[in-house]
Image (cartoon, grey):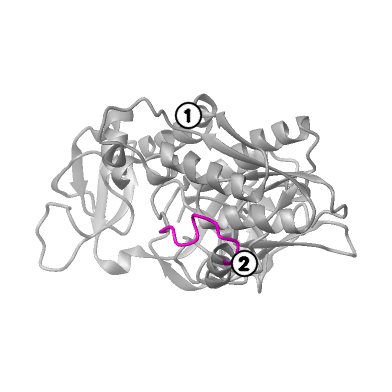
Amino acid sequence: MRESHSARVVVGMSGGVDSSVAAALLVEQGHDVVGVTLRVWPWQEPEAAPGRFGSCCSPQTADDARQVARRLGIPYYLLNSEREFDRTVIDNFAREYRAGRTPVPCVVCNQEVKFGSLLRRARAWEATAVATGHYARLERDPRTGRYLLLRGRDPRKDQSDFLWPLTQAQLAAAEFPVGALTKEEVRAKARALGLPVADKPESMEICFIPDDDYRGFLRRRIPEAFRPGPIVDRAGRRLGEHRGLAAYTVGQRRGLGVTSERPLYVLALDPERNAVVVGEAEGLESERLVAAETNFIPFDWPGEAIRVAAKIRHSHAPAPAEVRPLAGPQAEPGERRVEVRFDEPQRAVTPGQSVVFYDGEQVIGGGIITRP
């Protein structure tokens, strides 16, 4: 937490219970709290709004956040971030799918929007920090002075793997007030304070995707990514025709439209040939991967190979691995590459996803998987 209990903190309020309790805890600690909701998606929609909005981006979101702010007695603002969000998050989301990769839009949003543009705006308001409802924790290393990122205390809700790209400057200006609580404790706190969102259901969808139909969204956004092409096996033999690379992801089994004596899975997406490569389950096993755009948190760059537990998707249990640097710390962000070698092969390593490195509770860093 900030040293001064009268510091101004801007809280990103999603209208959910986690960010609402984050704001409440900061008020209790004596901070000058300002609530902000970022409108990142158009609200000029015809009727049937529940079916047209992602639940994170509907007018109801702002209404819920506004009611919480009123209950807490803090100022509240609704900011139009639609154009910036489209340019930074949605463009990247579409571009990655067009290239045959499967991105994690929350990672880009945290880096570029919540702790990027919102943090810059907060500083213009003379705020010292931006707070969110992420389940993660921060500490300061007394030896180096660097900020450290740790898992949230609730292992079922931990969101530290969405925060690995944050720089030291961003971590220094971040607050995660609910990171030391469990979800049950957060809801209990909300009920005790009489917050109207105490029992609001969680949203697991991508915030800007209506009805959680990401393929329908991509079909409207980048129709060229749905150009049919061949489904081939590892030897290059044509087995059928796919519906467009954006309709598939590594590890997918259902909906391939090809018959085989044994189950087939998507092994790779090849944008150069516009081909979906399929094979049997053992073809999904990878002993290594290469990641780019790598960021490390306790130090700038490893001088040699380091041991970590590497997590290749949000639902993945971190696996023992060795991280070897492939480029120096002065390389451009896209060239800050590392090789990750697993002690045991891992299933469905997917380009575009994050690989996140842990040492116990601590996030060592992460990167974007470029190839298994």
Horizontal arrangement in the rendering, residue 345 relative to residue 339 (left or right): left
Region rendered in magenta? 192-201
Q: Which mark is residue 86?
A: 1
Query: Based on the displayed image, in which of its 4 quarters is residue 49 positioned?
Result: top left
What type is the residue that disc 1 sits on? Answer: Asp
Q: Main secondary structure of the magenta part?
A: loop
When the figure is inspected, residue 23 is found, relative to residue 304, above or below; the finding is above
Taking depth in this image into account, of 195 and 53 the one nearest to the observer is 195
Horizontal arrangement in the rendering, residue 364 relative to residue 340 (left or right): right
- Residue name at image x 82 percent, y 54 percent: 2
Taking depth in this image into account, of 285 and 33 the one nearest to the observer is 33
Horizontal arrangement in the rendering, residue 341 relative to residue 34 (left or right): left
What is the spatial separation of the Cα atoms under label 2 and label 1, in whole angstroms? 29 Å
- Residue name at image x 37 percent, y 39 percent: 97
- What is the quadrant of the N terminus in the image? bottom right
Query: Based on the displayed image, in which of its 4 quarters is residue 120 positioned?
Result: top right
The local secondary structure at tag 1 comes to: helix
What type is the residue that disc 2 sits on? Answer: Gly
Compare marks 2 and 1 and give the one earlier in the sequence. Answer: 1
Q: Is residue 4 magenta?
A: no
Percent x, y of residue 88: 53, 32
The local secondary structure at tag 2 comes to: loop
**Residue on which the image places disc 2:** 152
Does residue 273 appear in the picture of this structure?
no
Percent x, y of residue 294: 63, 49
Does residue 237 appear in the picture of this structure?
yes
Query: Based on the displayed image, in which of its 4 quarters is residue 362 positioned?
Result: bottom right
Total numbered labels placed on residues in the image: 2
